[in-house]
Each structure stands twice: as C-alpha cells, then as structure tokens.
Amino acid sequence: MTVDRGCFCGCGEEAELGRRFVQGHDVTAAAALRAVEELRLPHQLAVLGFGPERSVVEAAVREAGWVRCSGCAYVGPSATHTCTDAPVGDQSPTTALRAESGAAQGRLLPGAADPTWETVPLHLRQ
C-alpha cells in the first residue's frame, strides 16, 4: 500500500509523515484559495454560522481552549498570552496564570477552575 505524502498545496514537494502540507504551505494555500474562490472572511464566517449574532471568538474560548484575560484585552491561545496584569486571586476559567514553581515555572497555565485541567492526569496536575 502506497501512502501519498504530496503537499496539499500542489507544489509537488513531499510533506513530512503525518502532515498534509510542507511547513508554511498551508498559509499560502489558504491565501490562494481565497483569491481563487473570492471568499472573504465575512462570507467564510457566515457559511459556518458565525456573525454578529454568534461570535467565533466566544466559540474559540468555549470550544478550543482560548483564553480571555481579565487583566488585559487579550483573547487567543493561552500559549501566546504574556500578560501578567490579571487581578490577584482571579481564578476564572479563561484566565491564564504564570506558574511560580515546578517544571512549568514562568509559563502561562490555565486558571485553576479551567475545565481543561480535567483532561490532565492527576499526577501531572500536582
């Protein structure tokens, strides 16, 4: 059985095992698709059911683990959040906190009440 590992952008290069694109080619392919199909972001959002009445950002916070920081205006993946201005004691599920000790010292982690902790094995939470 042969596994096709050609990059999905159509460049002819071979993608790494387990990937569909050569690194960076997904961004180029997405831009090219928008140019060819003339699909603009509002249209794409509307097709997926998002818009003024249903926020894609709120869906990302609820469903994709994004954070909404109470200390700044940041909304996005917790790994890229660098704010240290969250109010002391703020443990809302969407507030990332900087670890003070242990292997994660200095890294931003979800707040203690964040439901994503339920998926982490107990021995790794301590």
Image (cartoon, rainbow, N blue to C red):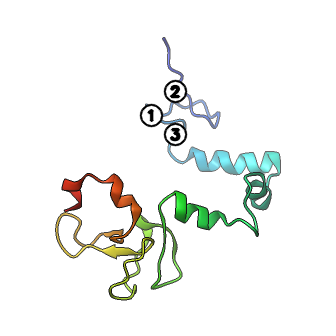
Name the residue nearer the viewer: 79 or 57: 57
Q: Residue at x 53, y 65 (%)?
A: 61
**Which mark sits nearer the N-terminus, 1 or 3?**
1
Residue type, label 2: Arg
Residue that mark 3 sits on: 22
From this view, report whether residue 11 is shown above or below residue 51. above
Would residue 114 be found to the left or right of residue 47 on screen? Answer: left
State the CA–CA distance, disc 2 to disc 3. 10 Å
Residue that mark 2 sits on: 5
Secondary structure of residue under mark 3 = loop
Quarter of the image where the C terminus is located: bottom left
Residue that mark 1 sits on: 16
Q: Residue at x 61, y 66 (%)?
A: 57
**Which mark sits nearer the N-terminus, 2 or 3?**
2
Secondary structure of residue under mark 2 = loop
Residue type, label 1: Glu
Q: Are marks 1 and 3 in contact (CB under 8 Å)?
A: yes
| Dot label at residue 115 | none
State the CA–CA distance, disc 1 to disc 3. 7 Å
State the CA–CA distance, disc 1 to disc 2. 7 Å
Q: Are marks 1 and 2 in contact (CB under 8 Å)?
A: yes
